[in-house]
Amino acid sequence: MKTYKLGISLAFMEEISEDSNLSAFGDAVVNFLYSVAKSRVQGRYTGKKVSNVALSEALTRSKIKPPRRSDKKMRGDFVEALIGKGYIEKTFDINDAVDMLSEKLKGKDLNDPIEENKAIAEAFSYFIDHYF
């Protein structure tokens, strides 16, 4: 059975996608990471909600297989749960994660919603592959 850097199996990863509390916690972590990274890149403070569509695309681009029979919302919730669990398990350092995301966002048009979603998907796909 394949395990990832968190040391958990794919079956367990499918289970965490069903934990709404972990997903809600991960949602806050994802939004915080992205808001800080975007603020650094743009040189002004911003608070941004990362959409499930962008997170779903990030998962599709990553090396991790999405949960079976899942839609975009479920895949987005899965990414949020994964990142929330990663934070709890100290899989990544917040400052290093923000640095990584900031680097991936540099030079991207974060004022255009379509281009911003593409940039988010690319940055979080890299994040997922690096940490998980």
Image (cartoon, rainbow, N blue to C red):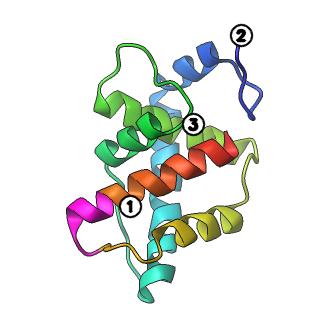
| Structural distance between the alpha carbons of marks 3 and 1 | 20 Å
Number of marks in picture: 3
* Residue at the extreme top: 1
Q: Earlier in the sequence, mark 3 or mark 2?
A: 2
Residue on which disc 3 sits:
82
Region in magenta: 111-117
Residue on which disc 1 sits:
119
Q: Around disc 1, counting alpha carbons within 10 Å, would you say few (fewer than 14), some (14 to 19), or many (20 or more)? A: many
Three-letter code, disc 1: Ala
Q: Earlier in the sequence, mark 3 or mark 1?
A: 3
On residue 1, the disc is 2
Across and down, in percent, residue 14 comes to 53, 18
Where disc 2 sits, the SS reads: loop
Q: Are marks 3 and 1 in contact (CB under 8 Å)?
A: no
Across and down, in percent, residue 126 comes to 56, 51
Three-letter code, disc 2: Met
Along the line of sight, which residue is nearer the eye, 39 or 24? 39
